[in-house]
Image (tube, coloured by chain):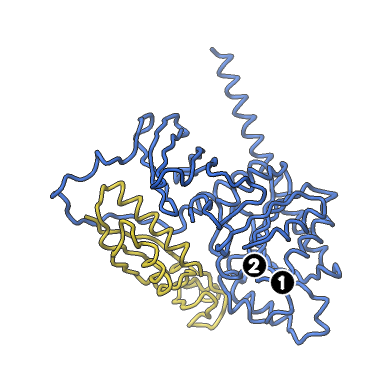
Amino acid sequence: MHEMSLAEGVLQLVEETAMRENAQRVKLVVLEIGRLSSVEPEALRFCFEAVVDGSIAHGAVLEIVDVPGVGWCMPCGESVAMDEVFGACPRCGSYQLQPTGGTEMRVREIEIE
Amino acid sequence: MCTVCGCGAGETKVEGEAREDSHEHTHVHEDGTVHSHAHEHGESPLGVHSHTHRHADGSEHGHAHTHAGEHAHHHEHGIAGDLDYGAGPARAHAPGLSQSRMVQIEQDILAKNNAYAAANRRWFDERGIFALNLVSSPGSGKTTLLVRTIELLKGKVAISVVEGDQQTSNDAERIRATGVPALQINTGKGCHLDGHMVGHALERLQPADESLFLIENVGNLVCPAAFDLGEQHKVAILSVTEGEDKPLKYPDMFRAADVLLLNKCDLLPYLQFDADLAEANARRVNPKLTIFRVSATSGDGLAAWLSWIEAGLEMQRGKRAETVAALQRRIAELERQLTAR
């Protein structure tokens, strides 16, 4: 999906935080990307490298934490693992699944100096 | 491009807007305060500019920032009432004292867009405006469907339209031909509308209270799914000349939508398209989806779609009535306090 805009969003949050903390350099950026979010981690990594060029986060290591998908299966009445947003319940095969976890796209933390 | 206001050269253009180098901007902060300021682009060599903000609490601060093709707005908010001139060089680290440390951010990547969208939504609710964000792949018949919908509804309700496309104002012209105001936003290299662009469109179009506000997003089944514009509902349009498996191929959009219009149904007799299978695939991705089978050309099925819109307008009118009632209660309470003095 829209990884370039997202990479710019990440850089904005990183720059705001780095400026508030009077950082001189950002060494590490940690993101949490859920498996059910609309982000392709590899494409985001590619775009991140492009947008941080020349910024305070130039050369920063990007760590992407993979958050597994979890959904609530209505027929089972239980939380089950979900690999795709349109996936079936691994227990009963129903598609009546509501994603409850793994939809996040967040900047968790940064390491600065 | 400027990711905050979308005002870079060759990038986002709001139709009819003078291309001068300075303009007015409105910001929404995470705490919900909104402020606006003027700024200029590209006059000083480094693109540095400064501006002053007034916050909802009455405090004011000024700060400078640098443009390098795009700008991020770094706002330092002090304690309420402080005058704050931002994180200038005077507050920089003393040399030799730097040490590496972790700082928690814990923020959604789309937090900024979501804040703009929330402000738009509040604006719509306070005025009883029913806003729809129409999304589909290019060529599904969005504009034809819009034109038809407008023709059938314009006698009953005020309508305004935002048209998003990478280039040209062809769609806005088609809408204007129906007699309702339309604003074209060209996203340039961008592939979706965002909450900030729609906020600007609201300022320009000034939709009437209790009206219908239609946003035709850029024809793209991928990116617009993630960008909330402040609408009440996303409406996905799938035409029967596409594949039945499109909801499975592009699940994010069909999951983000509340309504699916299966368009060009007048062509079904000539195609090998299985409409039931398409609906089943869409419901597999999003069990809550409301589906209407329509044809913008023949008019078939439009009655159900129009009554769904009218129900939405009615609900938004209720929200405006609540806002008005709350304000009246507040006035009554303040008057009571005044007489008590």
B290 sits left or right of A50 in the view: right
* Chain painted in blue in the figure: B
- In percent of width and height, residue A73 lies at 52, 74
Tell me, for residue B228, which label it has, or none. Answer: none
- In percent of width and height, residue B71 lies at 43, 51
Of all residues, the one furthest to the top in this rendering is: B341
Q: How many marks?
A: 2
Q: Residue at x 71, y 69 (%)?
A: B291
Q: Label 1 crowding class (10 Å Cα cut-off): few <14, some 14-19, many 20+?
A: many
Q: Nearer the viewer, residue B153 or B284?
A: B153
User: Where on the picture, by quarter, is residue B133?
Assistant: bottom right
Tag 1 subunit: B
Of all residues, the one furthest to the bottom in this rendering is: B272
Tag 2 subunit: B
Query: Which residue is labeled 2 in the image?
Result: B219
Which of disc 2 and disc 1 is earlier in sequence?
1
Does residue B125 appear in the picture of this structure?
A: no
Label 2, secondary structure: give it.
loop
Q: Residue at x 83, y 83 (%)?
A: B269
Disc 1 and disc 2 in contact, CB within 8 angstroms: yes
Query: Which residue is labeled 1 in the image?
Result: B140
- In percent of width and height, residue B201 lies at 63, 48
